[in-house]
Image (spheres, rainbow, N blue to C red):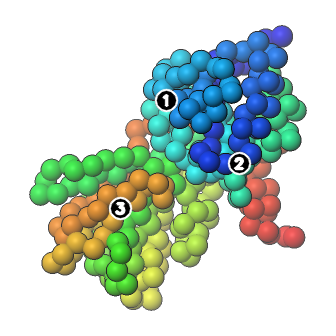
Amino acid sequence: MEYRFHKIGIIGKFGAPTVGETLLSLTRCLLDKKLGLFMDEDTARRHPENSLPVVSREEMGEQCDLAIVVGGDGSFLNAARSLARFDIPMLGINLGRLGFLTDIAPSQIDTHMEQILLGDFTEERRCLLNSHILRDGECMAEGAALNDVVIHKLDIARMIEFETHINGEFVNRQRSDGLIVSTPTGSTAYALSGGGPILAPSLRAVVLVPICPHTLSNRPIVVPGDSEIEITIMGTSGHAQVTRDGQSNQTLMAGDKVLVKRYGHAIQLIHPSSYSPFQVLRQKLGWSG
């Protein structure tokens, strides 16, 4: 039988009590089909019972033609940031709560994997954001995000002040708890809880959502996906931080600029053929119950 994918990388969620059992079910299913399997280093360290070849994320991106993430959306976000530049298709098995990105239940592994390996699946591309922190004109840090880049107050119950420019044009100066710069993928995450709109995953757009703004007329803005967004931290001292996908962060100082624009690579998501983004919204958000 000719399968669509032949070398598969596996990444497991950190600390989940059920991940070991699900990893064993997945590897048994794939090994029965005589496929080449590789496990990333962190997962192999936590689950030595899997005697698969161990590779780094970079080696996985270079050698594999499919990556499977066993975990929740957080695990998938982490894997996506490290694998996006390799243009490797990604598939998620859900051990989390919501599962907007990881949409196969552990009980469905055998059924869905057979269909997907035979080429019966839906695929889509999702854009990422890239962010740079500039301090006195020097780049202090950079990183990609699949969901969002968030500028927010650090550790005090006090608003921060910043200016926003889009494509070099001044937008506003605001005082708030921060600003969420989100992709369509991230529009159902932190941006949604902040009052932002849900964007269709296929849109090439970015949404800016203020966090608890002092001026109530300050509302979310949707801009083209190729926009260059610049946020400058104002004031005399820094009490702000930038966070990517809620997982990596750096402290900001007064005068720092955060530049956000579309990342040079997209990720390719693999879903079961029955996948529908509106069905996911109905299920995850409790619509039409």
Disc number for residue 132: none
- Residue depicted at x 77% and y 22%: 30
Residue 136 occupies which quadrant of the picture? bottom left
Which part of the image, by quadrant, shows the C terminus? bottom right
Query: How far apart in space, not on screen, are marks 3 and 2 (Cα)?
Result: 31 Å
Can residue 17 be seen? yes
* Residue 127 point in image, percent of width and height: 51, 45
Q: Quick check: marks 2 and 1 in contact, CB under 8 Å?
A: no
- 200 displayed left or right of 93: left
Alpha-carbon span between mark 2 and mark 1 = 23 Å
Which comes sooner in the sequence, label 3 or label 2?
Answer: 2
| Secondary structure beneath label 3 | strand
Give the Cα distance between marks 1 and 3: 24 Å
Q: Amino acid at mark 2?
A: Pro
> Would residue 268 be found to the left or right of residue 241 on screen?
right
Q: Is residue 50 above or below residue 171?
A: above
Q: In the rendering, at what x and y percent does residue 70 appear?
A: 68, 40
Report which residue position mark 3 lands on: 242
Q: Nearer the viewer, residue 72 or 149?
A: 72
- Amino acid carrying mark 3 in the image: Val
Say whether disc 2 or disc 1 marks the residue closer to the N-terminus. Answer: 2
Circle 2 sits in a helix, a strand or a loop, which is it? loop
Q: Which mark is residue 57?
A: 1
User: Which residue is depicted at the point 53% across and 40% down?
Assistant: 80
